[in-house]
Image (tube, rainbow, N blue to C red):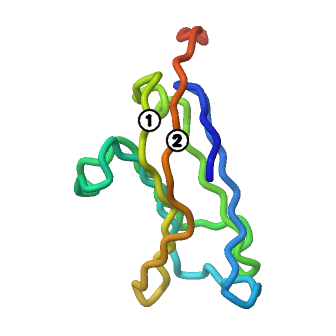
Amino acid sequence: MINSFYRGDTQVYTLTIKDKDGNAVNLSGSSVWFTMKENPTLPDDEATLQVVVIDHTDPTNGITKIVVPATETSKLKGGHTYYYDFQLVDFAKNVKTLLAGKVEVLQDVTQRVE
């Protein structure tokens, strides 16, 4: 589960991906997707926000970092709840949902940072 966050803030999620036995999943050749939608049934091309990571922090130990820049979170609606998920797509194109849920985006006050 991810915590609520302020619209316009950079979000960084570091994931350590393990198999059912607790062993690190080798992420070499894999991608990790982070998707946010207002309605989970919308197609991905209508996602509110989507980040794909193919260069992992430590692929052999299953560690990856998803960075959602402020320029992307500033496009979200403050005071709104979105559906999200993190998915792993391995080298063989197998898809595994790692985490999913709802997250509230809080309204920011300062919108000018320069």
| Residue depicted at 52% across the width and 34% down the height | 104
Please tell me which residue is depicted at 76% across the width and 78% down the height of the picture.
61
Residue 91 at x, y = what percent? 47, 86
Label 2 secondary element: strand
Q: Earlier in the sequence, mark 1 or mark 2?
A: 1
Does the CB distance between marks 1 and 2 fall below 8 Å?
yes
Q: Horizontal and vertical percent for residue 36?
A: 41, 47
Dot 2 alpha-carbon crowd within 10 angstroms: few under 14, some 14 to 19, many 20 or more: some
- Observer-nearest residue: 114 or 103? 103
Q: Which of the image's four quarters has the C terminus? A: top right
* SS at mark 1 in the image: strand
- Seen at 58% across and 26% down, the residue is 6
Asked whether 28 or 93 is in front, the reply is 93
Amino acid type shown at disc 2: Val
Q: What amino acid type is highlighted by mark number 1? A: Thr
Q: Could you say which quadrant of the image residue 108 lies in? A: top right
User: Which residue carries the number 1 mark?
Assistant: 81
Q: Which residue is mark 2?
A: 103
